């Protein structure tokens, strides 16, 4: 589908195409329920980490291990990606398909940059700090929580990339719009989770 044709088709959509049909509204509602379940799961991982954060087994502690400038840079990238996903939804509501696609591409790029920094962080811990998954109860809880979030980021990148392809083939319709909207909800969710990780794991680790 050409950009001009896609823009023309999108111009016939309502202001919030993700809610234009019953199916679309049900998808949004169901996804809120899914995020509730995800919140419980992450809450369990946070509780486990807090219970084990001082069980270092003579390995490095959080204060000795973490490099806040690197983590702050990753945090900045992920927070900016949340903003670009907002711009994408705003473009969708205006029927601007090309602008929507571009903001989704920027979101994916920033997410990839975040993952690269996280993988680099893990590699430094393993190679130079001898801080592996089985070093201590603290390390196991850390890699489980942060790695689980990283897996969510990777899934979100893949999901949004697939939607960009669908947008190119099918254009913006009442069928594709709900998918894009709930993917943005998911992306905001993993951004919020990361803010908690940055605060509870990294900041409290450095000052605790």
Image: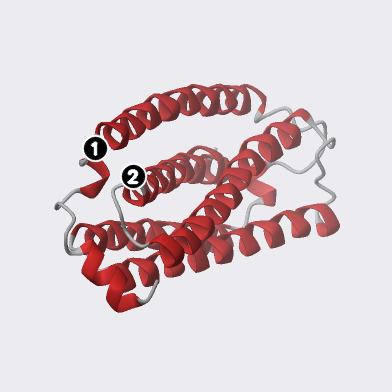
Say which mark, if any, is on residue 21: 1
Task: Say how many tags the image has.
Answer: 2
Mark 1 residue crowding within 10 angstroms, few (<14) / some (14–19) / many (20+): few
Q: Residue at x 33, y 47 (%)?
A: 181
Q: Position of residue 201 (x, y in %)?
A: 56, 40
Front residue of 42/72: it is: 42
Task: Please give the residue where the numbered disc 2 appears in the rendered image.
Answer: 178
* Of labels 1 and 2, the one closer to you: 1
Q: Residue at x 58, y 54 (%)?
A: 158
| Residue 99, visible in the rendered structure | no
Q: Are marks 1 and 2 in contact (CB under 8 Å)?
A: yes
Q: Which of disc 2 and disc 1 is earlier in sequence?
A: 1
Secondary structure type for disc 1 = loop
Q: Quadrant of residue 55?
A: top right
| Residue 163, visible in the rendered structure | yes
CA gap, disc 1 to disc 2?
A: 9 Å
- Of the 4 image quadrants, the one containing the N terminus is bottom left
């Amino acid at each position: 589908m050409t950009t001009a044709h896609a823009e023309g088709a999108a111009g016939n959509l309502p202001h919030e195409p993700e809610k234009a049909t019953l199916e679309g509204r049900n998808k949004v509602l169901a996804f809120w329920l899914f995020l509730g379940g995800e919140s419980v799961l992450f809450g369990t991982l946070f509780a486990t980490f807090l219970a084990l954060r001082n069980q270092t087994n003579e390995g490095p502690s959080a204060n000795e291990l973490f490099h806040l400038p690197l983590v702050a840079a990753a945090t900045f990238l992920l927070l900016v990606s949340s903003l670009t996903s907002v711009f994408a939804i705003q473009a969708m509501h205006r029927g601007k398909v090309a602008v929507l696609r571009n903001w989704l591409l920027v979101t994916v790029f920033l997410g990839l940059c975040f993952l690269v920094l996280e993988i680099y962080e893990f590699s430094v811990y393993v190679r130079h700090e001898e801080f592996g998954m089985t070093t201590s109860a603290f390390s196991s809880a850390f890699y489980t929580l942060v790695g689980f979030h990283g897996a969510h980021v990777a899934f979100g990148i893949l999901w949004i990339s697939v939607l960009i392809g669908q947008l190119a083939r099918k254009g913006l319709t009442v069928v594709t719009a709900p998918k894009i909207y709930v993917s943005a909800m998911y992306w905001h969710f993993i951004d919020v989770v990361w803010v908690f990780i940055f605060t509870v794991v990294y900041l409290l680790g450095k000052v605790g």
